[in-house]
Image (cartoon, rainbow, N blue to C red):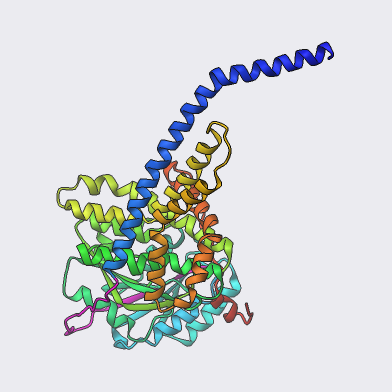
Amino acid sequence: MEPSQIFTKSAIDSFFIQYNTEGRIILNAMHDFFNTVFYGLLITAAMLSLLYIAMSIYVSRPKQQKHQPINELPSVTVHIPTYNETVALRCAEKCLEFDYPEDKYEVLIGDDSSDKSVSMEIERFAEAHPKLKVHRRGSNQGYKAGNLNNLLKHSKGDIIVIFDSDFSPSKDFLKGIVQPFMHDEKIAGVQSKWSFTNADQNLISVLGSTIVEVFQRITMPFVHRRRKIAFLCGSAEAVRKKTLTELGGWDNGNLTEDIEYSLRLIKNGYRIEYLESLECESEVPYLPKDLYKQQMRWAYGVVSSYKKHAKAIFTSKSIGTEDKIYTTLICSGYLMTTLLAGLFLTGFLSVITHEPAKIDIARFAMETARNIALTSGLILASAVAIMKSKKSGNMLRMVTASFSYGLIVAYHVNIGIFKALTNKPVKWHMLSKIGNLKKTGHTS
């Protein structure tokens, strides 16, 4: 054996001796730490999973909401904020067909479009429908919230009803959503339930619609039935103009102005009514990048808004403990996503810091199956939400989408949460909508 070979072998032996005596101790400590954190996260995720199952059981029976007749209907202004979207005209057409006294409501489009051809098309439509008024700012500063604040200055109605451009309300929608305002002055907002015309278009739309339906058909009905707490969702919603004005309007530039205003209402002692029986059709993202960006923005907006108001809500003596807990529950809708990401990371680190040993495939498979079962509450809630939306045919596709595209959605959600916690900005992303393709004569 060459002297250099002897030296090399000696150096390698020396390294492994030092590794076994010093490095292994550090790695064992790291393994114990990651393993402890992993099981702590697993217990938390299992408890949250049980909560989703309990909520699903609780809301499985449909609730009939009854409202007293209204002697005189309130005046209403409909807001349709839009940015380079001709589908807004489809929404406007539906709004002009409302079964509501003509002298009691008006329709306003807030056109922030940078595309002049879109603005021209909206202008031609408005000229043919005198009841519809268009207001422009020349930019989209402050995003949707800025657009809505501008429309608020031109609104005559006592109640403001808001639709995103891809929503298609029914003729009786307006009468339904104003009902609660007339019987309780403390109700400052009303939210209807969404349904999706393209929910079964592809795996992306199945996943996107399921995410919303779990919130609107499981979480919010549960909280509202328990404590009469609900949140605005940004569209197919109504707010009392007087209260909105007194509280300073929409939070300009906020990416989820609906959540921020909901928390502001709760903080100031107002209520939001959720109408489980009133539905409004809309679209859901069908392109991967749109769903990823949407969910990142929503996660960012929810966490940012909760950070802004959590202290005031929890220190308020006028808000009960249960109401504080349920408010937090609604704002923690993305918590399971973060827990699952934490489980994956700590589980991986626990494995690679484990003392070298032969892989026990049977044990690995059994523990993986156990962990999936313990955290499957959200999947079960998704199944219940799909059944409640009468789209049971999407069940298998939902599971497939959850364990494929859902992993990428989870990544973007956690990016949004991280940016919110570290005060990093997130940009508004325009979603592709089928209605825009149809309005311009193209097909998808």
Residue 101: horizontal and vertical position, in percent?
Answer: 29, 88
Task: Look at the image and tell me in which quarter the C terminus lies.
Answer: bottom right
Q: Position of residue 9 (x, y in %)?
A: 74, 17
Main secondary structure along the magenta-highlighted residues: loop
* Residue 346, above or below 280: above
Residue 136 at least partly seen: no
Q: In which quarter of the view is residue 301 placed?
A: bottom left
Q: Residue 363 or 134: which is nearer the viewer? A: 363
Instruction: Give the magenta part as a residue range.
Output: 60-83
Whether residue 322 appears in this view of the structure is yes
Q: On screen, 17 above or below 345? A: above
Identified at 15% across, 48% down, the residue is 317
Does residue 103 lie above or below 421 as drawn?
Answer: below
Residue 382 % position (x, y): 41, 66
Q: Give left or right: position of 324 versus 281.
A: left
Observer-nearest of 82 and 328: 328
Residue 151, image x, y percentages = 39, 68
Residue 299 within the magenta-colored segment of the rendering: no
User: In the image, what residue occupies the spot 17% across and 84% down?
Assistant: 69
